[in-house]
Amino acid sequence: MSAPRLTRVTGALAEARPMPRAALYELARVGRRGLLGEIIRVKGDTATLQVYEDTAGLETGEPVEPTGSPLTAQLGPGLLGAIVDGVGRPLSRLAEAMGDFIRPGTAADTLDAAARWSFTPALGPGNAVAGGDVLGTVPERAGFEHRILVPPGVAGVIESLRAGSYTVGDSIGSLKDGTPLALAHRWPVRRPRPIGARLGDDRPLVTGQRVFDLLFPAAEGGSVAVPGGFGTGKTIIEQSLAKYADADIVVYVGCGERGNEMAELLHEFPKLLDDRSGRPLMDRTVMVVNTSNMPVAAREASVYLGITIAEYFRDMGYRVALLADSLSRWAEALREISARLAEMPGEEGYPTYLATRMGQFFERAGRVTAAGRPERGGSLTVVAAISPPGGDLSEPVTQATLRVTGALWALDPGLAQQRQFPAVDWSTSYSLYADQVAGWFAAEAGADWPELRRGALELLRRGRELREIAGLVGPDALQEADRHTLESARIVQELVLGQSAYDPNDARSSLRKTYRLVGLALALHRRALAAAARGARIEPGELGPIRRALAAVRESAPDDVDARAAVAERLLEGLAGGAR
């Protein structure tokens, strides 16, 4: 049989024949330069490939060489701190070897083959093992224990397992059937890694951002959509989550973002310090980078690579946050590939399987009991930014995402223009996890946390209504109680929900600070309404000191929260003659 050759090239798509034994999603080397491609359709002996690299210069008749395996992620020590492209090539090592531009057809393993790691076994010869069991540990970064796992699908009895210094390619032992054991293994990125059991969504992912923790909490192991137009702060929110969220590991996927934005991120991110350990944030971060000028096919690969890496750390028993920015670029890549395949288009030209792909992706999130022994829990929380054209949340990508996610953090350009950050629209956003995690917040922050959340949401809703009325008839036409409600809603918006990323004491808000702030703001509202009901008037000058006291609570260090809150409480007691 003759060797397969290219018969057609159109953009990122190429066709080759004869390939009678081609498998769906099998990788192949395309053309004389050996460009990396993936088979996405098989018809007879003709295979259609999406090429992950620039196809400029490809000619019909050039050879195609199937590899016999799908796109896989290399998983093992050395992932933390890594910056890789959409197919897992390490950008820093490639830059050292060939400069700022990757040569077409370049192949490189994610993990450094020369790096040596000190392995300490947890099991010995004669122990029966199965996929997911912990063989031993490697101290990868300060304070982080990398657990070496039996690859899923591998089982047997240990013949040998040796302590020592190894590279990721060395054998650290073997099973009695001859299967070698190593520090690293590979896993197909499109296939979810197996788990032991799924756990409930009754624990929150504490983000350190008051508007999320208080009003729209995310569950640990949940999924969140963050749609917003240009300039609404999606990237800043994801960076804040990476730095302050209660996660052990962060996997950041830049999917089709602007090159200058990604360059700035790569320049600034390594300088950030972990709020908990004081060490560089990159010590617990993996970055997958795919800019908008890269081939569109690689965007899909980058998303699947990122979530596979996140699942690997989840299987070790860690809490992992996957931050994807943005899924709209991935959907646009699907649309472009689908159009070149001449598939039947769906709404706005997106493929009809858009919702299915979104569902398959988000279903890989979850809080689980990991497969294997010893028993351990882990979680994978997915927070995905979306860039709807014109900020229209009714467009297909946003709607497909909302069907499969548990929380919506909708960003409002109007709030961003008012310098309200995070610019979360509380009238549109929601969380399906709020009732499930309410008990945890009540136990950890305060018994009346659920009541404070409901009170804040109702006050914000009523405040928006009154602003619209005041815009028509003027604020002087409002009754005294309504004017107090309008002012109280403004205080909640500005002093409780607003946060400054530049203030070291306000960039991350502890649950205690959030609890005291919202409690004081709602207490002020109740006293103002009580004063209005008995005909007492609160002068604007009386509110000034209270606003400053609340601002002092917001800007306080964690150890000073209660002391400054006590000052605000004393001012509240004297408001309008002690009205309650």
Image (cartoon, rainbow, N blue to C red):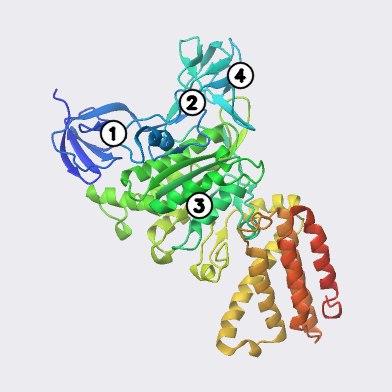
Label placed on residue 152: 2
Amino acid on which disc 2 is placed: Pro
> x and y percent of residue 1 in the render?
14, 22
Residues at discs 3 and 2 in contact (Cβ within 8 Å):
no
Secondary structure under the numbered disc 4 in the rendered image: strand
> x and y percent of residue 425 in the render?
55, 66
> x and y percent of residue 185 in the render?
46, 25
Amino acid on which disc 3 is placed: Thr
Q: CA distance from mark 1 to mark 4?
A: 37 Å
167 is higher (above) or lower (below) than 229: above
Q: What residue sits right under mark 3 in the picture?
A: 405
Task: Nearest to the eye among marks 3 and 4: give it.
Answer: 4
Secondary structure under the numbered disc 3 in the rendered image: loop
Q: CA distance from mark 3 to mark 4?
A: 40 Å
Q: Earlier in the sequence, mark 3 or mark 2?
A: 2
Q: CA distance from mark 2 to mark 4?
A: 21 Å
Q: CA distance from mark 2 to mark 1?
A: 30 Å
